[in-house]
Structures are given as C-alpha cells and as structure tokens.
Amino acid sequence: MVDSRSASPRRATGKAEDPDYAALAEFRYAIRKFLAFSEEAAAEAGLTSQQHQALLTIKGVDTGEGLSIGGLAQRLLVRQHTAVELVDRLERTDLVRRAADPSDGRRVLVTLTREGEKRLKQLSAAHLDELRSIGPTLTDILATLRTPPS
C-alpha cells in the first residue's frame, strides 16, 4: 500500500497575489498518492480503477432504480460509448446488471449485483481508512490554501 502521510506544506514566499506553489504542489501530491493507493487497491480486488469508480458511482448516485448509462458517463467524465463498454465488461464479470427503464424503454439503467456490492464494500472500507489517515494532511494543506500568503 502507498503511504499517504506527507510533510506539511511550506508557505510560498513572495507577493500577496502570487499563487502558493508549495501548497498547490503538496495538494496535488497528496491527491496523486491517494489515487495511486486507489488504483492499487482496485487492482488487488481484480478491478481497474475505472471499474471501481463505476461501481462507486452506480452505488452512490443510484436512487433505487439504477443509474442510466448516460448518467454514469456524465459522472465519470467519459463519452457514452465508453460507459457502455465499461458496463459491458462489468456485466460480463457479474458485477452489474442492466435493465430497461420502466418509464422510458429507450434508457438503460444499471444496478450492482450482489458480487458488485461485495467488492465495492471491501474497497470502500479500505478507501475510508486511507482517507482517515490522510485527512489531517489534506486539512492542513487546504487551510494553507484558504489563507492568502503574506
């Protein structure tokens, strides 16, 4: 696993209107470390990072009827055909199922299967633990960014 703790960001020196490059660099570094952790955790669960993101999006945004493929594409910032291919792969591994929208037969709704729920629950527990461990660092970085440099 990737260690998510890092040194506190240093304040950039310079004019008040200068960006705080050190804090921005630390924030980006912390995010990249979290994303590396996430990619590694997904791989250990037999998923790609994008598949994990799709499962999380479907579960997190679903209002009980499923999430449309268009809605999934929008949330993942991908094109519709990319979301269709992603759902195809997830369906072949029995992690999601799709069904026609009862109120609009042209739309396809996607829901998690039991196996999809199980994998997502395991990954989410690991991600929450990681976020709890890096939370103080992120809080410090964000506090630095909220305070204009002197």
Image: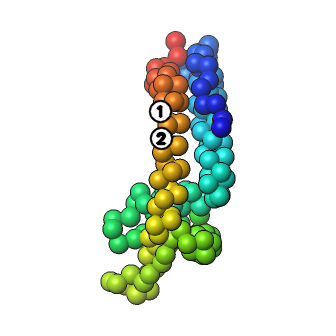
Contact, mark 2 vs mark 1 (Cβ under 8 Å): yes
Residue drawn 33% across the image and 68% down it: 64
Q: Which secondary structure, mark 2? A: helix
Amino acid of disc 1: Arg
Which residue is more in the foreground, 104 or 47? Answer: 47
Which residue is more in the foreground, 142 or 54? Answer: 54
Q: Which residue lies furthest to the bottom in this view?
A: 105
Residue drawn 62% across the image and 54% down it: 45
Amino acid of disc 2: Leu
Residue 50: give x, y in percent of width and height.
Answer: 61, 58
Q: Does residue 28 appear anywhere in the picture?
A: no
Which residue is more in the foreground, 3 or 145? Answer: 3
Cα distance, mark 2 to mark 1? Answer: 6 Å
- The answer to which quarter of the image holds residue 47 is bottom right
- The answer to which quarter of the image holds residue 1 is top right
Residue 75: give x, y in percent of width and height.
Answer: 49, 60
Q: Name the residue under label 1.
A: 132
- The answer to which quarter of the image holds residue 6 is top right
Residue 5: give x, y in percent of width and height.
Answer: 59, 26
Q: Which secondary structure, mark 1? A: helix
Above or below, 50 relative to 99: above
